[in-house]
Amino acid sequence: MAKFSDDVTQGIEKSAARAMLRAVGLNDDDFNKFQVGIVSAGNEVTPCNLTGPELSNFAKEGVNGADSAGLIFSTIAVSDGISMGHEGMRASLVSREVIADSVELVMHAERFDGMVTIAGCDKSLPGMLMASARINRPAIFLYGGSSLPGVYKGKDISIVDVFEGIGAFDKGLISEEELYEIECNACPGQGSCAGMFTANTMASVGEAIGMSLPGTASIPAEDDRLRDAAKKSGLQLNYLLKNDIKPRDIMTIDAFKNAITTVLALGGSTNAVLHLLGIAYEARVNLDLSTFDDIGRQVPHIADMKPFGKYHMVDLDKIGGVPVVSKILLENKLINPDCLTVTGKTVGENLENIEIPTNQDVVYFPDNPIASEGGIAILKGSLSPKGSVVKTAGIEINEFSGPANVFESEQDAIDALFNNKINKGDVVVIRNEGPKGGPGMREMLQITAAIKGAGLGKDVLLITDGRFSGGTTGLCIGHVTPESFDHGPISICKNGDVITLNLTKRELNLEISESEVVSRLEDYVLPEPRYKSGVLNKYSKLVSGADTGAVTS
């Protein structure tokens, strides 16, 4: 059987390559085996990826055997939590593309036959899945694990509580000492953010789409079961190699629909929309925004998870993890049981022996859901002709109308809030933060959390061509397309313009005449690019709109 790795292991002319491989520990026997890349985003930049190096070693132990030899390499990651609310956040979404590109380059150059991918933070997870889909060699994904929640005054807390605390302190609702105590207790150890924020949402996607072993998405980072899962993932890759099962065999349109259904049922992060579109692009699957809304109208929101609910990822793990959610969805004919997974079995076969616990309130049932529709909706209208995204989970209103309060960046909006220039009833518009115009489509947890912390969470609507953290709650609409830099209507909003939201109709409208829109667009002048060199400049020239996943390849 011909292998990609034959390019570096077979024949007299490959003596130099083999000499190099001997230096890293391979021997004659290894040169006839599958060569496997084991890649993590392990680093000390963020607690989300601290487990990467250790899990890579366990995965290598699983890979190594009679048929395969594993070699470890790494890629980058940035911390969304640390980069939030300043210029550094512009690098976050860009890092997803760099991760996918860097994994592709190593796989291409070293001629690995397959790979185990390990990641823990918001962009490294989709970056790994995008790379797997693009390269299309046997691959398996392992989540680096979530953190346990911290504790403050007897209540479980997470990083989101710190961001909300900043807003509460600014408005005099808590003391500096209280904010300090929240800061010191919010992140007790390694692992990704504890709630159903972006990392845990995308870990759930990894399972739901069939690229991770069942039950691995919810295991805490500090749990020894995760080390066992790493070894099992390595072992399972051997099965995928022997049977030539590739990511595109698994990540079909029906598998994407299963993943979308799971995200909506969990009330997961709006970033999942952006990332699933990006993964689908690499998997050559035709997926668009309308699919999310079509499914969202049919799938109930059933998981009572943070940031809007009561529970963290560890609580979902205690009742059986994502397989329990999948079993509920399957029994109600909401997911496709016939999709292939990395186990070599179908979704239905994987779930045959899963029991649904009844003495719990983490996950509800479709006949008595938290909400009758999924936790994310897609809006269109005169302000977002190509679409925008809102997390409906936890929102108690269907309509909002108010005057625009327009800002050219997130920082301008934060300064306005702290100077009491954002008021009840305002529609806060933050533009020039899209993939091209940002560049980088910053997450805006700082402003959304500060608004909530200031007691305005139910009284202010925030709209942006940027995006939001998985920890964001409240009246927040992101991914407005076309973005400002693409001459979208958001570019010509003026202070005082009335903006209207109708969730039932899935509409977001700028209440000015079509002729006025045309007139303003004719007069609109693009602002100067924020970056005229370097990676952010390159990214702005290559990236697509948020409605197509903000991809660059």
Image: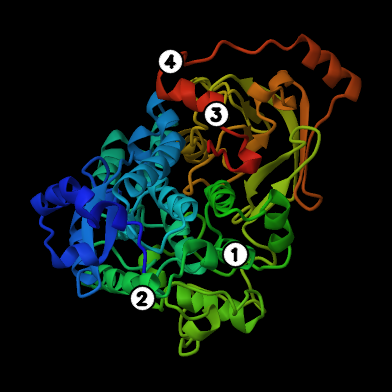
- Residue corresponding to mark 1: 252
Q: Position of residue 290 (x, y in %)?
A: 73, 52
Nearest the eye: 336 or 134: 134
Q: Secondary structure at mark 2?
A: helix
Disc 4 marks which amino acid?
Ser
**Which quarter of the picture shows residue 256?**
bottom right
Along the polypeptide, which appears first: circle 4 or circle 3?
4
What's the distance in space between the residues labelled 4 and 3, CA to CA?
13 Å
Asked which secondary structure carries label 3, the reply is: helix
Residue shown at 67% from the left, 68% from the top:
299
- Tag 1–tag 2 contact (CB < 8 Å): no
Tell me, yes or no, if residue 196 can be seen here: no
Of badges 1 and 2, nearer the viewer stands 2
Please name whichever residue, 376 or 340, is drawn nearer the observer in this view of the structure.
340
- Tell me which label, 3 or 2, sits earlier in the chain: 2
Give the percent coordinates (x, y) of residue 335: 62, 74
SS at mark 1 in the image: loop
Question: Alpha-carbon distance for marks 4 and 2?
Answer: 45 Å
Q: CA distance from mark 3 to mark 2?
A: 37 Å
| Residue identifier under label 2 | 239
Instruction: Report the side of 315 relative to 52 (left or right).
Output: right
Number of residues whose C-alpha sits closer than 10 Å to that of mark 2, classed few (under 14), some (14–19) or many (20 or more): some
Q: Position of residue 163 (x, y in %)?
A: 40, 39
User: Image quadrant for the N terminus?
Assistant: bottom left
Q: Nearer the viewer, mark 3 or mark 2?
A: 2
Q: CA distance from mark 1 to mark 2?
A: 20 Å
Query: Circles 3 and 2: CB distance less than 8 Å?
Result: no
Identify the residue under disc 4: 533
Q: Quadrant of residue 535?
A: top left
CB atoms of marks 4 and 1 within 8 Å? no
Q: Residue at x 72, y 26 (%)?
A: 488
